[in-house]
Image (cartoon, grey):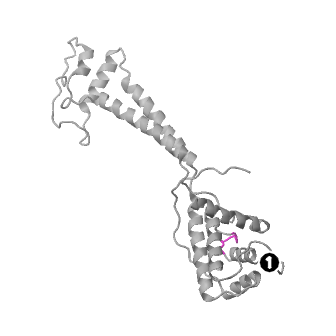
Amino acid sequence: MARHSQKLPIASAAGKHILVIKEAEWQRIENGYGKQLSEEVRASVVEATENFLYWEEFERNAEPVSTSRKLIKTYQRTARSFQLALRARGTSGAAYYAKHLVRKNFADSRFPITAGASDPTDEIPSTVNLDLDAILELPCHGNFELFHWLTGLLTSFEVSCETALNEVTAENVGFKNNQAWNRWIRLLTGIMKRNSLPFAARKDAEGKYGFVALVKELQETLPEDEHGKKKCKLPYADSALPSAIAVARRSGFKNKA
């Protein structure tokens, strides 16, 4: 059996779906099911089906976890490259002076810099031979050493990326394929049980698949797009419904365990 890709626990959807089942459609559903449904049961079936349509859209739109994993790896690689660049001291005067100028001109109110503090190297005479190592050690904006602080920040960021990768790999809380359909089947089963109506997913005494026919006919009433295709994803062919219903009910017991 093919493994489905893990999905994110977040997604977007249009919102609540309003399902209208016409009387002729109810007649077809009841003929297939082999039982008449009261107005109360009909209302419960519609509510359960609207719930399915709502969550199925989230499930269908949820992106794979692998997309987030790739992004985190990109953040981590970029942070590591930037950190290595900041740590590179170089041996030329240009490298030393470049860092000095960045430090001198850096200003951001969100960072621990004393506004208006002066730098003793604001004016460096071009004719004077300075100790370039000393330039980077001079106090800059209230003794705030920009490159040292950024390096530490990026180290923490890189560690957080590694932790995030472990978390996103271990998580199993995202949307799962067919989860909405399985829950719909369990809701329909509960409605039939509470109203003393047939709910078996196998042939009855008359050789009919009552509950299976109910699901099949309900699926036929679901909204279609302009091309006549169902807007929602229906995961199983009609012939697979009996076994799929059994699996859906068992998955409910697993979730409660």
* Residue furthest out toward the top: 129
Q: Magenta region, mostly helix, strand or loop?
A: loop
Q: How many marks?
A: 1
Q: In the rendered structure, which amino acid carries the disc numbered 1?
A: Asp
Residue that carries the numbered disc 1 in the rendered image? 204
Can you name the residue that lies furthest to the right here? 207
Q: Position of residue 233 (x, y in %)?
A: 66, 64
Q: Is residue 61 above or below residue 19?
A: above
Q: Nearer the viewer, residue 98 or 205?
A: 205
Expressed as whole percent of the image width and height from the top left, the position of residue 229 reads: 69, 69
Rendered residue at 67%/88% (across/down): 23
Around disc 1, counting alpha carbons within 10 Å, would you say few (fewer than 14), some (14 to 19), or many (20 or more)?
few
Residue 40: % across, % down? 59, 86
Residue appearing at x 75%, y 68% in the figure: 241
Q: Indicate yes or no whether the magenta region holds residue 223.
A: yes
Query: Is residue 216 covered in magenta?
Result: no
Q: Is residue 39 left or right of residue 120?
A: right
Q: Residue at x 56, y 51 (%)?
A: 172
Figure check: 121 above or below 115: above
Q: Quick check: 90 above or below 86?
A: above
Write down the region rendered in magenta: 222-229
Q: Is label 1 in a helix, a strand or a loop?
A: loop
Q: Is residue 230 visible?
A: yes
Q: Residue furthest front?
A: 257
Q: Quadrant of residue 211?
A: bottom right
Q: Residue at x 65, y 85 (%)?
A: 22
* Quadrant where the C terminus is found in the figure: bottom right
The image shows residue 238, relative to residue 164, as above or below, that is below
Q: Position of residue 191 (x, y in %)?
A: 62, 78
Residue 19 visible somewhere in the drawing: no
